[in-house]
Image (spheres, rainbow, N blue to C red):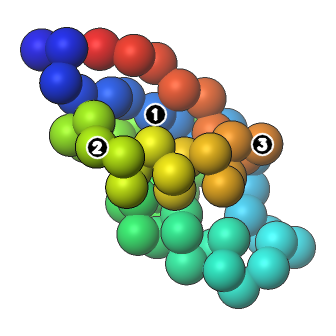
Amino acid sequence: MADTITFTLVKSGIGSTDKIRATLTGLGLTKMQKTVTRKDTPEIRGMLKKVSHLVKIVEG
């Protein structure tokens, strides 16, 4: 399953801009410590780069 990427929200989006919060929602990260697995696409990678200071990324 190398075509997926797993990531966890480790820091809250409170106090962030509306765009950052919308990106978190778009990724499916709605609560702290929530782990989500998505297909590894360039679009998802770009969204994760935008919120990299709030998430922990685990390949696989």
Q: Choose top left, top right, bottom left or bottom right for residue 14.
A: bottom right
Q: Which residue is mark 1?
A: 7
First-in-chain label (3 vs 1): 1
- Disc 3 marks which residue? 53
Looking at marks 3 and 2 on the same chain, the residue that comes earlier in the sequence is marked by 2
> Is there any visible trace of residue 34 in the rendered image?
no
Query: SS for tag 2?
Result: loop
Badge 3 crowding class, 10 Å Cα cut-off, few under 14, some 14 to 19, many 20 or more, is few
User: In the rendered image of this protein, does residue 2 appear above or below residue 31?
Assistant: above
- Residue at 46% across, 33% down: 7
Look at label 3 and name its amino acid.
His
Mark 1: amino acid: Phe
Evaluate whether residue 44 shows in this view.
yes
The C terminus lies in which quarter of the figure? top left
- Residue 5 coordinates in the image, percent (x, y): 33, 29
**For residue 54, above or below residue 18:** above
Question: Disc 2 versus disc 1: distance between alpha carbons?
Answer: 14 Å
Calculate the distance from the C-alpha at mark 3 to the C-alpha at mark 1: 12 Å
Residue 38: percent from left, percent from top: 25, 42
**Quick one: SS at disc 1?**
strand
Q: Which callout, 2 or 1, points at the residue further toward the start of the chain?
A: 1
Residue 9 drawn at (x, y percent): 58, 43
Badge 3 vs badge 1, beta-carbon distance below 8 Å = no
Question: Where residue 41 is drawn, which disc sits there?
Answer: 2
